[in-house]
């Protein structure tokens, strides 16, 4: 007989744990979470008793509606942890599941996933061994994407859009910025995240209704512009990529755009 709760002895031994909810017809999780006590069972209870709408609840209700006694599979992946360790395990599993197409119904990314989540080896170099950038030898605009990157990444995960790391950066930097006529002189856009140049794009002409343009007004915004770009050639990227401008930044500076160091 299936149980929908743990007894007190089991709860004491479990401590903090990470769990997954599975569709019984599939061998992939649709939700990954962290909890204590009977948290793992509360999602099904909520889907059956609450009026709330969410992708997770809709999935649970779909499973329950298929046939009588059709049940969500509850799996504890790791247990006996502190809350801090459980948060990290949860985050790692969410990152990996989303990268490999599990199509999770989690509404947010894992705990601290922007700072310590899944990274390429280039990301690791950027974070821990970035060399200072002390000279700009092209006409560039440096655009800070701290806020925009997180918004784009979270939105992509929620709608299961599979961007690569470079695509995420481009989606974050390409629009929509308050930028004046000086934009017409810009050859390259440097995407900056937390003081590090994470990608370099050449601004290119794109034909719209027979008219070539490099920058375009963004619909729905007043006086905000986007650019058409492609990855810069390697000889240009090598000058700027993975370099740090943190030593040039003034504390409290609000403008995300800069043209000089």
Image (cartoon, grey):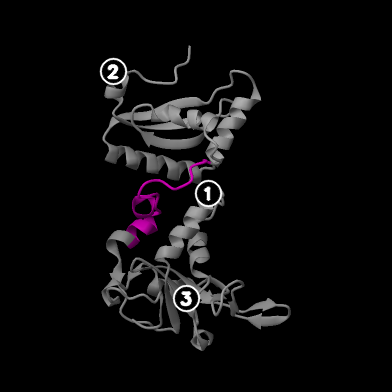
Could you tell me how far apart the alpha carbons at marks 3 and 1 are, in whole angstroms?
A: 28 Å
Q: Nearer the viewer, residue 190 or 158?
A: 158
Determine whether 236 is above or below 182 in the image.
above
Residue at 55%, 37% in the rendered image: 51
Write the residue at 49% across / 28% down. 45
Q: Residues within 10 Å of mark 2 (few under 14, many from 20)?
A: few
Q: Quadrant of the C terminus?
A: bottom left
Residue 256 — which label? none
Q: Quadrant of residue 191?
A: bottom left
Residue 172, percent across and down? 49, 65
Magenta span: 104-126
Residue 79 pos. (x, y %): 32, 29
Query: Hey, which residue is sitting farthest top in the picture?
Result: 1
Q: Is residue 132 above or below residue 135?
A: above
Task: Please name the residue that numbered disc 2 is placed on.
Answer: 9
**Disc 3 element:** strand
Residue 83, position in %: x, y?
29, 38
What element does badge 1 sit on?
helix
Can residue 105 be found in the magenta stretch? yes
Residue 205 included in the magenta stretch of the image: no
Q: Quadrant of residue 130?
A: bottom left
Please state the horizontal and vertical placement of residue 81, each as a whole percent of the image: 28, 32
Tell which circle, 3 or 2, labels the residue nearer the N-terminal end.
2
Residue holding disc 1:
158
> Residue 189's mark?
3
Nearest to viewer (mark 2 / mark 1)? 2
Report the front residue among 98 and 146: 146
**Residue visible at 44% across and 36% down?**
32
Residue 26 seen in the current view: yes
């Amino acid at each position: 007989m299936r149980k929908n709760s743990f007894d007190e002895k089991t709860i004491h031994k479990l401590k903090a744990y990470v769990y997954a909810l599975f569709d019984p017809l599939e061998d992939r999780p649709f939700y990954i979470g962290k909890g204590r006590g009977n948290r793992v069972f509360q999602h099904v209870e909520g889907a059956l008793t609450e009026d709330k709408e969410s992708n997770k609840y809709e999935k649970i209700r779909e499973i329950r509606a298929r046939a009588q006694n059709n049940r969500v599979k509850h799996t504890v992946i790791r247990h006996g942890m502190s809350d801090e360790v459980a948060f990290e395990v949860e985050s790692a599993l969410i990152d990996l599941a989303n990268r490999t197409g599990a199509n999770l119904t989690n509404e947010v990314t894992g705990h601290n996933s922007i700072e310590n989540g899944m990274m390429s080896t280039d990301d690791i170099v950027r974070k821990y061994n970035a060399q200072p950038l002390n000279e700009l030898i092209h006409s560039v605009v440096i655009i800070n994407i701290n806020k925009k990157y997180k918004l784009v990444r979270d939105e992509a995960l929620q709608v299961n859009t599979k961007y690569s790391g470079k695509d995420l950066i481009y989606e974050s930097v390409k629009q929509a910025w308050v930028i004046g006529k000086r934009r017409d002189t810009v050859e390259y856009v440097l995407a900056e995240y937390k003081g590090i140049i994470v990608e370099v794009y050449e601004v290119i002409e794109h034909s719209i209704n027979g008219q070539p343009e490099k920058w375009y007004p963004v619909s729905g915004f007043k006086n905000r512009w986007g650019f058409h770009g492609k990855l810069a050639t390697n000889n240009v990227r090598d000058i700027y990529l993975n370099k740090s401008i943190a030593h040039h930044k003034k504390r409290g500076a609000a403008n995300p755009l800069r043209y000089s160091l």
